[in-house]
Every structure is written in structure tokens, then in C-alpha cells.
Image: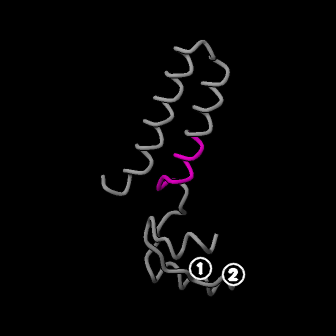
Amino acid sequence: MRRWILTVLMVACGVLVAVAQLSAGLPVVGGVELLIFLGLALLLSLWAFPRSMSAAEAQRASAADGQPIVYWRPGCRYVVGLW
């Protein structure tokens, strides 16, 4: 659950901002801001990272297509900089 904290926080902030804009009578602005926060939540979620595979699978795939192997963990700030 700890790895999902940023995602949940972005969704919660988006909902709060949208509700505040709706109560102020600005539904379009609230909807746009909600979409922005949901997009940020998606980028920060674990779904933005590719599926993990074992080292043996990665070596077989690398040998087949010549792609380099990148070892990573979900949320690793060093690997995120490579994308």
C-alpha cells in the first residue's frame, strides 16, 4: 500500500479541488482540474511501469532482440529519470 500513497494523494487532491470548484459554481474548471490530477495520479501509479520479469526471462528476451536489460523497482527515482 505504501507504494500507492502518491497516487491516492493525487486522486484525493483532485476530488477536493473539483468539489471546491463545483461549490464555487465553476463546473468546467473543476472537471478540467480533476482530469489533470487523475492524469498525474496515473503517471505516479505502478501502472506506468512495465511488467516485471525474472532475470532469466530478461536475458532470453535480450538475446532474442538485442535490447538492454534495466533492473528496476517500482517507484525507483533513478530509473524514472531514464524514461
* Residue marked by disc 2: 65
Image quadrant occupied by the C terminus: bottom right
Which residue occupies 44% across, 65% down? 74
Which residue occupies 62% across, 74% down? 82
Could you say where residue 10 lies in the image, as x and y percent from the top left? Answer: 47, 43
Disc number placed over residue 71 in the picture, else none: none
Could you say where residue 1 lies in the image, as x and y percent from the top left? Answer: 30, 52
27 within the magenta span: no
Three-letter amino acid code at the position of disc 2:
Asp
Up-down relation of residue 53 to residue 10 (above or below): below
Magenta span main SS: helix
Write the start and end of the magenta stretch as one range.
38-47
Q: Secondary structure at mark 1?
A: helix
Q: Report the residue that reaches farthest toward the front.
A: 24
Three-letter amino acid code at the position of disc 1:
Ala
Q: Nearer the viewer, residue 65 or 27?
A: 27
Q: Secondary structure at mark 2?
A: helix
Q: Nearer the viewer, residue 83 or 23?
A: 23
Which residue occupies 62% across, 39% down? 36
**CA gap, disc 2 and disc 1:** 6 Å
Residue 26 picture quarter:
top right
Number of residues whose C-alpha sits closer than 10 Å to that of mark 1, classed few (under 14), some (14–19) or many (20 or more): some
* Residue marked by disc 1: 61
Q: Left of 73 or right of it: where is 80?
A: right
Contact, mark 2 vs mark 1 (Cβ under 8 Å):
yes
Could you say where residue 52 lies in the image, as x and y percent from the top left? Answer: 47, 68
Up-down relation of residue 50 to residue 59 (above or below): above
46 within the magenta span: yes
